[in-house]
Amino acid sequence: MSFSDAEVERYARHLVLREIGGPGQQKLKAARVLVVGAGGLGAPAALYLAAAGVGTLGLVDADTVSLSNLQRQVLFATADAGRPKVEAAAEHLTALNPHLVVETHPVWLGEANAREIVSRYDLVLDGTDDFATRFAVNDACVAERRTLVSGALGRWTGQVGVFQAKPCYRCLVPEIPPDAETCALVGVVGALAGVIGSMMALEAVKVITGAGESLAGRLLIYDALAAETRTVRIGADPACPSCGGLRTAT
């Protein structure tokens, strides 16, 4: 897979990185990545994946852009209010990088369609704030053996984890928490979405290129108010309804 002169100039800062270089950039160009949720996390993640040179980016979101999104969803502009998110996102992402192919899925992802959509991609990023969707995405990734990069945020705290078959997201969150909160209910500082979304994109780039050590099997928690981060290891649950029957990933 060769690069045009324009692509060589565009990705020059990657090409000189020892951990990425030409081979890593070729992997990025060949990669098919799915972003579930074009919201606070999906918006910055999609921007950085597009800029990084990911060849094909799938976007799943059935919502439209509202003015309340713009405080943190930096992929959109004021003029996009009322437009389908995936439509506006595709326009802005290809304006950023014309070498990118964007595949749009203007649907709500759930048990009925998750596996069919996930199977088309190599890697999945989930930035939704709905646990039913999160479980559907996780179960589809486990069934299709796709790596899942999961992010979440609320108020002043965010987290990022990478799940490769086992342990899976359900090992971390086995059931919907009774006190589950959403950003719409409790609020979120806008810049935090950029921090966590960018971390998700970074983990995706590392997984695709094989650079460094990913967060596989670990969860990074960022407390923005205290300016502190900590990382905890996630144990595999042998009774997990999603990955319990799988052998532990290496």
Image (spheres, grey):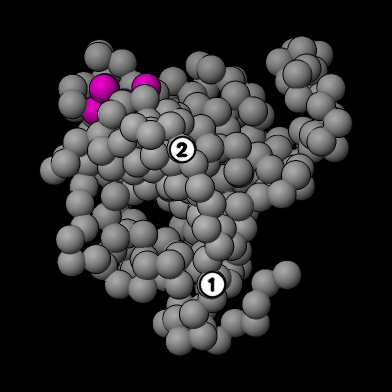
Numbered circle sitting on residue 235? 1
Q: Is residue 157 left or right of residue 116?
A: left
On the image, numbered disc 2 is attached to which residue?
228
Q: Quadrant of the N terminus?
A: top right
Residue 184 visible: yes
Residue in the picture at 76% in, 42% down? 211
**For the residue marked with disc 1, what is the amino acid?**
Gly
Q: Secondary structure at mark 1?
A: loop
Q: Is residue 70 magenta?
A: yes
Label 2 and label 1: CA atoms lie apart by: 23 Å
Determine crowd level at label 1: few under 14, some 14-19, many 20+ residues with C-alpha closer than 10 A: few
Residue in the picture at 50% in, 27% down? 47
Where 180 falls versus 241 (above or below)? above
**For the residue marked with disc 2, what is the amino acid?**
Glu
Numbered circle sitting on residue 30? none
Residue in the picture at 53% in, 72% down? 235
Q: Quadrant of the C terminus?
A: bottom right
Name which quarter of the figure residue 49 lies in. Answer: top right
Q: Magenta segment, which residues?
A: 69-74
Where 161 falls versus 223 (above or below)? below
In the rendered image, residue 69, in percent from the top left (x then y), is placed at 24, 28
Q: Secondary structure at mark 2?
A: strand
Where 120 falls versus 2 (above or below)? below
Where 27 falls versus 114 (above or below)? above
In the rendered image, residue 249, in percent from the top left (x then y), is placed at 67, 72
| In-front residue for pair 63/185 | 185
Determine crowd level at label 2: few under 14, some 14-19, many 20+ residues with C-alpha closer than 10 A: few
